[in-house]
Amino acid sequence: MNQTRTILGLLIMIFLAIPVLFGIIWAVGLTQAVVSQKTLTEFPGKIIAEVPNLLDGMLLVAQDENSSLDYDSRTWLKAMAGASPPPRELLEETGLNNWLEKELSGSLRTLGDILNGKTAARDIWLDMRPLKSIFSHPIMERWLSQVMENLPACSSSQAQDWERIMLNESPYDSLPPCRPDAAQKIAAVSFIRSHITREIPDQVNLMENAHFPHNKFDVAKTVRSFTYLLFLIPAVLIAFGALVAARSKSHFFRWSGAATMIGSGLVLAMSSLVKGVIPWAMRIGPVNYSSSWTHWQDIFSDHMGGLAMVISRHFMSPVIAVGGTVCVVGLLLFAFSFTFNRETEAKTQPPQQPQAS
């Protein structure tokens, strides 16, 4: 009978309690990462800082004729790579970096304050006019002209495609990867600029259709508190499995602690692996270990390593913290089970006879 209960309890732990605990820890950790104030304050700035590296990677990939990029994309990227200043400097000189770091990051920081109950809910208007004005910047105009100049000459059919697009007869067609004649080139540059700016509104309300209480309300804390209640589900399953398998109080806490440590330990192992391996894999790449990993993929992965590290650290760190906390709870339960053994031994030990004087 005892052996049957032990096997049944073990099955409950393996197939129900531990998997559910594993999933809940991931859910709570990732939720904390999403609603954390750092997600809207520090995280966007780190992502923005990696944008130049991504652009550099894309332009380098375009130089590789063996890349899987389609002909049109590769032609445009090669033309951009040959223009001056390079995109990294273009972002700085036209003020795009400044807009990303101040206007966009500032609006997201305000949104973070609202979500964390530091300020009352209100409209947050993201001013897009500085972004639109960047495309009228003299440096941007010269850069676009150089890009057009670096394109191969248009054939007669491609020139007609340009003409139809600029007349809005085919507004949804992609731009032909070629250089129109001198008269048409000026109009093409003007069309590209106007087409981009026309699609950008003057302002964007980040709180549009968001229904928050008008007074200060900590949405992030409320969500985090709710996710912590989810731990009741694996706690009930672990307690049930321990009750079935245990033959004493000490066995109950020992089973509970062991199952908790196993579930959280698996999370710690996997999240730590993801946090460390993804950036390493993006930097090293399987180029030396896989015949299907091509040179252009290796080039791009070199420039993705920093972004992969930023993302993995931001989202995996809370998972590791939650997993570590749960693992400590399991360790305490497991250690607490041995106190019952000592109490039992103390009760069963016969009293010592007083020594004769």
Image (cartoon, rainbow, N blue to C red):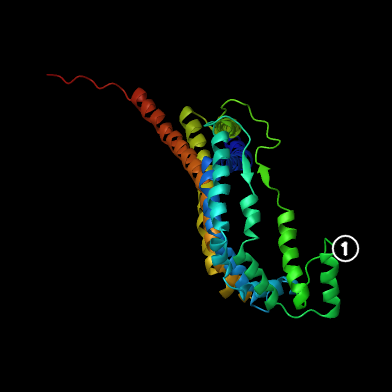
Is 276 on the left-hand or right-hand side of 136?
A: left
Q: Quadrant of residue 195?
A: bottom right
Residue at the extreme left of the image, as rendered: 357
One can see residue 188 in this view? yes
Q: Measuring 65% from the left and 41% from the top, which residue is drawn there? A: 206
Q: How many marks?
A: 1
x, y percent for residue 112: 55, 39
Quarter of the C terminus within the rendering = top left
x, y percent for residue 73: 72, 70
Q: Secondary structure at mark 1?
A: loop
Q: Measuring 54% from the left and 63% from the top, which residue is drawn there? A: 93
Q: Nearer the viewer, residue 355 or 163?
A: 163
12 vs 313: above or below: above
Q: Nearer the viewer, residue 300 or 177?
A: 177
94 vs 113: above or below: below
- List the residue tagged with mark 1: 169
The amino acid type found where label 1 is placed reads Glu
Q: Residues within 10 Å of mark 1 (few under 14, many from 20)?
A: few
304 vs 294: above or below: above
Q: Measuring 57% from the left and 52% from the top, which residue is drawn there? A: 99
Q: Quadrant of residue 291?
A: bottom right
Quarter of the N terminus within the rendering = top right
Q: Measuring 61% from the left and 65% from the top, which residue is drawn there? A: 138
x, y percent for residue 106: 54, 44
x, y percent for residue 64: 64, 78
